[in-house]
Each structure stands twice: as C-alpha cells, then as structure tokens.
Image: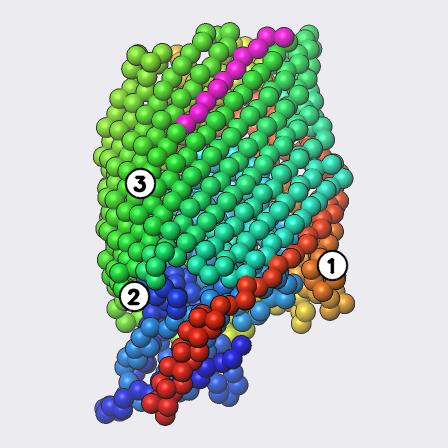
Amino acid sequence: MKKSVLFFLCILGFGFGTVAQTKLYGIVVDSANQHPLAYASVAVHALYPVDHLLASVTTDSSGYFRLQVDTGTYRLEVSFVGYRPQQHRLIVLPGQHNLDLHVISLVPAPAQLPSLQVEASRPVLQFAPGAILYEVQRDPRTIGRNGLEILSMAPLVSVSGGNGIQLKGSSNFLLQINGKDAKAMAGNITQYLESLRQDQIERIEIITNPSARYSAEGTAGIINIVLKKPRQGSFGTASTGVDTYATSYYSLNLNGKIGKIGYAVNGIENFWRNGTYDDYLQQTIQHRATVISGHTTPKRNNFYGTAMLSDELTQKDILNLNVQTFLGNGNIQHAFYTQTDTMETSDAILYHTLTLSADWQHQMDSLHSWVFSYQWDQLQDNNDILQNFISSFSKGHSDEHAFQLDLKGKRFEYGIKVDLRKLHTHFYSLSLTDQQIVFTQNIYAAYVSYQQTFGAYHLQAGLREEYAYNKGLQQQHDILFSQHQPDLFPSVSIDRSWQQEKYNLSFGYNRRIDRPQLYYLNPFVNTSNPYQLSSGNASLLPELTDNAELRLTLQDQKGHYQIFSFSYARTRHSIENVYYPLNDSVLRSVYLNVDVANLWGLSWYASLTLFKHIQSTVSANFYYLDYPSSDVQADATVIPLNQQGYFGSVRLDLRGMWLKKYRWSVSTTYNLPDVYVQGKGSGFFYADGMLIFPFLKNKFMAFLAVRQPFFHAYTASTHLKTTNLFDETTRLTTPQRRLFLGLQYSFGKPYQTRRETREKMQLEDKKTKSLQEIIH
C-alpha cells in the first residue's frame, strides 16, 4: 500500500499558562458513493520515542469519530474491512482546541484470498455506544469453527452444555442477520448457528443497549450476525468435514463484485449423528415414586442457503436484494422402560424458513441519508409423533411482512416501521381433537434518536413507541383473546473517555419487550415423552424488561483490553416453562407468565499475553437470578414459585504458532449449574483443541480437532421441585469425545479495475498531492 502523508497544521493561539487537549474529529465515507462508513476503525499512533498505539475509536452510524490528543506529532490510521487503509501524519501545535479533519474517503480494496496471517494492529474487538463489535475474521481462534462455537467466544455471551445461548445471563435476545430481524429462526437458533462456518461470518455485533432505531423485541439486547459482503473480484471457499460419529457438513461460498454489481451465494448442508443418549427419570408425585429409564437416538439434517445481489444505481443510491432459507428435518427415536411398562415413540420434525428482503439506500449528502426496507418471513414447523402406533401431529406456519423507513442526520435520526404477522397452527391429538388457531400480531412503531458529543462525553438518547394489536381465533370464529397494547421504550447511553481513549466508561438504560412466538403460543401437547408432556399457551402476555448496564473498557499500548460489566434487569410477566402434575405418574410443562424476575450480572473479558508466542483470552460471567414468591395457575392447579440462585461460566482460550507455520488453539469452559423457576441444573465442563495446517500456498487448509478429550460421555442432571406437588430428578448421558477432520479450499481472482476507475483513482491521487503542496 502506498501511504499518503498529510500534514494537518493547526492555527496558533495564545494561551494563559495552561495546555488543553486538542479534539480531533471527522467523518469517514466511501470514496465511490460518499456513504458514511459505520464502525470504521480510527487509530492514533504516537511517533516518539517509538511508534506505538495511543488511542483508537470506531465511527458511529453517521461515520463520525472524535479523539482527544495532546500537543505532538502523530500518525492517524483509518481502516475498514474491504477498503484500503489510509495513514496521515498529524502535527498538533499548542493552543489548538479543535481540529476538524473533515471528510476522509476510503477507497474499496481488491478482494484477497483468505490467509492465516492476522494483523496485530487491527483489533479483534471494537467498541461503539451500546455495542461491542467482535471482528471474526481478525481472530485466529475462529478458523475452522462453526457459528455456535464462534459466538461462545464473544464478550457477554455464554453457551451452556445443552447449547443454550445467553446474552448477559438471559436467553431472551433478538437475533439479527445482516441487521435484519430473524424471528423465524428463534425456535432453531442453535441449529442455525451450527450451520454457519467461519469463512461466512464477517463480524458479530453484541448490542446490549440498542438505540431507538432497533425493534424493541429481545429483552437482553441484540446479537447481529454480519455475513461477508461482496468485494471487488470473484472468489470463494469450499469446505467439508466429518467427525467420529459421522456428523458431517459440505459448504460452498461464492462472493464477488464487478463494477457496481455485487453478489454473494452461500450454501451449507449438515448431517448430524450424535450416537445414543441414555435417559433416567425419577419422579415423585402425590407420594407415588416412578423410575423411568430409556434410550434416545437423534438424527437430523439441515440446509442453510443465502443469495444476495447489490447494485449501486447511482453515486447516491444502492439497492440490496437478499434471499435466505433454512430447511431442516430430523427423527428422534425414544424407548422408555418402567417397572411395569415399555413404550416406544418416534418424533419426526420438519421446519423451513424463507426470508426475502430488499432495501434502498439514498445518500442526500455526507451527513444525511434515508433507507427504505421491506422484509417477508415465512416459517413452517411440523411435528409428527407416533407413540405405540397412536399418532398425533402439529402443523404450524407463520407469515410476516415488515416495512421500515429511516431518516438519518448527523445528530438526529427518525423512523417508522409497520410489522404485520400471521401465525397459524393446526394440530390433532387424543386429548384435543382437530384444532385450528390463527394468531394476528400487528405492530406499528415510530422513533426518534439523538446523539451529541460534549467534550469527552458522548450522549445517545431515544424514544420508541410501539402499538401492538394481538388477536387469537380458534376454529376461524371463536375469539380466544383480543388485545391493544401501546408501549413506550426509552433508551439512553452516556460514554466518557479519557487517557487518549484508552479508558472508556459507559452507562446505558433501555426498556425492551419479548412477544411470544409460535412455539410459545401453540397449545399442541407434545407426547414424545409420555411421562413429561409439554405444550404452549395461547394466552401468554409479552414480557417487559428494564435494563441497566455499567461498563468499563481498558486498553493498553500493546492492543490488550479488559472489559468489566455490571448489569441489572427487572422483568415483568416473565415467560417461564412451568411444570405441574396431571396425575400421579405424569408431569406437564406449559409456558406461563411469572409476575417478576430480577437478574444481576457481573462480567469480565480480557486478552493477555502469557508468554512471548502464546496469546490468551479469559472471560468470566456470573449472575444471580431471583424469582420472588408468587403463585401461578395451570388448569385447576395452583403452583407456588420461589427460586433464587447463582449461575454463570468461566472460559480460557490459548492460541499460538507451532513450527512458525501451523496455528493451534485450545479452549476450556466451565458452566455453573443453571437456575430455573422450579429448580437447578448441573455444571458442565467442555474442552477442545485444534490444529490448522495450511498447504499449497495457503489455498488449502486442513483442520484437526479433538473435542471433549477428557470425557467419553457426560451426564447432565436437573432437579425440579415444587412443595406438595412433585419432586423430579432427570439425568441425560450423552456421547462427548470425538475427533474432527476438516478441509477448506480457497479460490478466486481479484477483478481488474476498468480504465475509467483507474483514471478516477489517479485523479484522487493528484488532488491529494495538491493538498499536500498547499499545506506545506
């Protein structure tokens, strides 16, 4: 890269014996269309006595950034994924309080083939108001891993032994894909994430304090999976892998951009074979004890595919079209044995999601823009159960249409959104004859958001109003419920930086909502386990949560960082899975609203250098959950609830190079026992190691991984108890130790820039040279 050297000379002023810091600020944009680049990295390096990183920030949604420095000579580096980084030499003289760097234009870079080399100067984590950006492609730990494993490496996120995902200790978060709500994936999040590979993901955005622009759903916040975007050229990857239980996958990714037209096509198919599970259940209901043992053999396949097309219609207009589908099917065979009976069940599952979206972005000038977007989601979820030759089924599907318009300026942002949902369920069982229920959820929203910088402080505040209309119809004419719910959702974040941005303290508050989806509402009774029946609840209310978080971020000159986070959440109408006895040998679980749930959280995340060639990342998340005493009712049974407890996780990652060519990584995690509204689970320890072998000029990479080397099998237990109703202990033993082999091939060819594009770049160079001469 040819480095451009600019001298920004500040105007001399007269002081009165004191020296104040100078505030640097500017806007980073795309040179081709002048669109602001959100989350671009801006770093200031001190040149004396040696070149070292002094401070770094990321741009906000308007491309705006600010930094504070003392008098001196510095190197300013501006970079963004897919663009050529820029470097400028700054001389800050005494007396200058503000230095406007105006608009900094980044030129798109030709696509390059993947490499094992990771630039140390490009941080793995970046920080924005209310959000942490985890740059997946910059973290060598992620090579060869799937999306669920990668997500577990992100700050404030924990993945339990049962693949339960929690953000700040809560499983109620909103999943987004490329900034679009993915509610249709909510019932199969773990399967979806396991279907993604490292070479498909650009970054993961952990948004714990979303601004008013975002949907208010997801009480803990938002996890946004950003897939790779097209870049100049034509390239891709093909990969495959298999483990010792015959679980395998096949993946193909194509990505490219020619001129103004960009495209991306991704597809992956997974075949899951996880051996046989051993079940044990001991329950006491009305003083009668029952012991059940059994075996479970799960098998499932799924396919995830995406296609994206973008067109830069003009220098100010971009059109994006996206299609994604997730198709899965599975079969679970159960055999249950009691003292007097034997029962076999077969559970066939089919789910299919299809999402179409389009958005049109128009840039009015470097600071003002608007975006209009449309999204259609369709979900089909079928469940057929055969139990001792007696069948039952549930067929559900949903349609959702969302329209959104956002108007963005330097300080203010406004928008409106209309979300129209229809959820249909059709089911049949012995206890409930043929039933059909239709749910309508229409949401109308408007918001305003404001952001401003006051010296070392950054303020972002917003207000969102959502009006929800909910209606449930049974057999197409009987009204189950009809609700009108207007709600206000305020949000505010305050950031304070000092010591040249190396230290940052932020406080955030927001109110969020979790509206029940199809799998919560569907009243179909699942009988795949005849001793533990389960169903949804058509009368559920949405849960409302008030969140507060205080976060401290520390960075040193070597690029190491530490994150300390303290959070509190108070939830009303918390949606919980509650058990109660149907008779003296069968329990039933149903989703119910619990009055209040309080959750306190403390998290620590740090990157360290243990030895010269070994890097480490450490994270610890501890939470305290409190359900105050309350009673809920299911059918005619009154269920008293009162539960408190601690849970959390500790994780250590080590990584380095072997023989200066091969990359290795080791991960260990311990999850403390989970806390449920009626009991507790058991702890879980997980470990894995991976070796990566590049060959043939890094076009090929081979992966060798061992997972759970210390345990051939693992037994997880859960103890649920409600006084005077039931006492139950379950144990599930699953295969653990396995060896994984994978292979990835990277191919591609950078696009040769057309003559007129080269002439444009040459003209930009001439302008830069003239500016240098003027400054000198």
Towards the viewer: 537 or 2: 2
Principal SS element in the magenta part?
strand
Residue 757: horizontal and vertical position, in percent?
45, 70
Query: Would residue 524 be found to the left or right of residue 293 on screen?
Result: left
The disc placed on residue 693 is: 1
Towards the viewer: 686 or 437: 437
Q: Amino acid at mark 1?
A: Phe
User: Which residue corresponds to the image point at 43% horizontal and 31% vertical from the top-left?
Assistant: 378
Q: Give the spatial CA distance, label 1 vs label 3.
A: 47 Å
Q: Secondary structure at mark 2?
A: loop
Q: Amino acid at mark 3?
A: Phe
Residue 61: horizontal and vertical position, in percent?
34, 59
Q: Give the spatial CA distance, label 2 vs label 3.
A: 25 Å
Among numbered discs 2 and 3, the one appearing first in the sequence: 2
Q: Does residue 164 appear anywhere in the picture?
A: no
Give the residues drawn in magenta, as a range: 389-398
User: Which residue corresponds to the image point at 68% horizontal and 54% vertical from the top-left?
Assistant: 745
The disc placed on residue 403 is: 3
Residue 631: horizontal and vertical position, in percent?
37, 23
The disc placed on residue 58 is: none
The disc placed on residue 366 is: 2
Q: Amino acid at mark 2?
A: Ser
Among numbered discs 1 and 3, the one appearing first in the sequence: 3
Q: Give the spatial CA distance, label 1 vs label 2.
A: 45 Å
Q: Depth-wise, is mark 1 or mark 3 nearer the camera?
A: 3
Above or below for 418 versus 11: above
